[in-house]
Image (cartoon, rainbow, N blue to C red):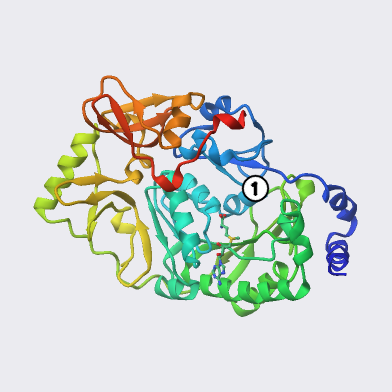
Amino acid sequence: MKMNDYFERMKTVLGEDYDRFLETVDKPAYKAIRVNTLKIQPEELLPLLSFAGDQVPFAATGYYVDVEKLGKHPLHHAGAFYVQEPSAMSAVTALHVEPGDKVLDLCAAPGGKSTQIAADLNGTGLLWANEIVRPRAHILLSNIERMGVKNAVVSNMKPDVLCDRLEGFFDKVLVDAPCSGEGMFRKDKEAIYEWSVEHSLSCAERQKAIIHSAAAAVKPGGVMVYSTCTFSPDENEGVVRHFLSEHPEFELIDTGCRFGTPTLEHAIRIYPFHGGEGHFVAKFRKLKGKNYKGKMFTYFEPPREERIEIEKFICDILRNPYFRHYHVIDERILNLPDVELLPDLEGMNILRAGVKLGDFKKNRIEPHHNLATSLTPYDFKQRLIMSCEDIAAARYISGEELEIDNWINGWGVATVNGVTLGLGKAVDGHLKNKYPKGLRTLAWKDLQI
Ligand SMILES: C[S@@+](CC[C@H](N)C(=O)[O-])C[C@H]1O[C@@H](n2cnc3c(N)ncnc32)[C@H](O)[C@@H]1O
């Protein structure tokens, strides 16, 4: 039986740790959140979340939680935290992102690791988050927006096409590869019945192709982290060995992580008995290769009339408007990431570069939700101040109109505990709800957390 094959293989892989592993098999899966330090600090957020417990060992801003359905919490809507499997936080910890880095996350949806990279960049440098599957790329974009990331490009491209085009461009590259997901078996108990050696081997072939493509995008002296959420040696050590044999310009280096079980000397394996569902992380340095020789982005300011219109719109809503690089594509108004760091984007399948501020409509500019998520409450002239406990916050998230005092007719932002949630437009003492329809959820209060 296939399942027996799986446990037999785990016995071989784990050796004397096998009994520790078996003890965890029927226990519930770990759950955790990662605080989004782009929006709020742990010491401000944690007192608001009665369900958050100890820090996870895999990332400085990760905390275990003991509840489900956190996606409905107002502070989740506001991007104050990301729900993430604890050991999944380890790959970005190993990547060791530094301010100003240009970082590629090649297999990025739904965005757990991308938003962790963004928090580590803290608004500096560039995050390029790519996802090959189109609907998943849109989920990635939605999470990048929710978490208030301003310095990201989100693309929907094949790894080989993207990495050939951006050869030698990135300081750091993360390949969090699609895998057979053995580290998810405690969360999805049925998945184990789908397990097969053949499936794992086909995943390994795909992983070899992806990491081979990724290698091109790393600049000489840059680093690459390869991670999976599976225990299969074919998809982990096997892929690493194969990669090193084909790419002598790379060396395996220490992950810098002091958790998990070492493997291949420098790589790590994380098992449930370490406090997470399961991950494999290996880190490489590129010793030599080509630096990026392609074109960089050519920035042109929008025409004067358009600029005046945009600036008037911004001044009407914001207190201290400061955007450096307005960019207009069709009717969309963007504020680009640092253009000195941007490559030429012509011909690439880009879903978003920077922050979408709004859209030109017939006689006006309509602000976009991303304007609210990328800024703080204090950037807005008018704000509705709520706490995550307030019924008004639950009503706002469900799309209801709210009553407001002292607003002049026009745009403002709804906030919870000092974090922006979304836009609203005041009309005669009522706040027309501009929270995007696709994000609205009902009845956080009914969950009684
Ligand atoms: C493990 S998931 C990434 C999870 C993500 N890094 C996170 O932390 O939220 C792997 C991703 O690779 C994508 N993928 C599937 N086939 C691929 C391929 N051939 N090349 C690149 N990515 C692929 C999947 O759609 C999936 O979103």
User: Which residue is more in the foreground, 94 or 444?
Assistant: 444
**Residue 382, x across and y down, in percent:** 28, 28
Asked if 445 appears above or below 270 in the picture, the reply is: above
User: Which residue is more in the foreground, 51 or 324?
Assistant: 51
- Residue 249, can we see it? no
Residue lying at the far top of the rendered structure: 406
Image-based side of 352 in relation to 203, left or right: left
Residue lying at the far bottom of the rendered structure: 246
Image-based side of 204 in relation to 371, left or right: right
Q: Which residue is mark 1?
A: 85
Asked if 216 appears above or below 269 in the picture, the reply is: below
Dot 1 amino acid type? Glu
Report crowding for label 1: few under 14, some 14 to 19, many 20 or more residues within 10 A (C-alpha): many
Number of numbered discs on residues: 1
Image-based side of 286 in relation to 298, left or right: right
- Looking at the rendered structure, the secondary structure element under dot 1 is loop
Q: Residue at x 17, y 56 (%)?
A: 301
Q: Residue at x 49, y 37 (%)?
A: 80
**Residue 37, x across and y down, in percent:** 48, 38
**Residue 445, x across and y down, in percent:** 55, 29
**Residue 293, x across and y down, in percent:** 35, 73
Q: Quadrant of residue 284?
A: bottom right
Asked if 373 appears above or below 328 in the picture, the reply is: above
Q: Residue at x 70, y 69 (%)?
A: 235
User: Which residue is more in the foreground, 149 or 83?
Assistant: 83
Q: Residue at x 57, y 52 (%)?
A: 92
Asked if 337 appears above or below 7 in the picture, the reply is: above
Q: Quadrant of ligand 1?
A: bottom right
The quadrant of the rendering that contains the C terminus is top right
The quadrant of the rendering that contains the N terminus is bottom right
- Residue 110, can we see it? yes
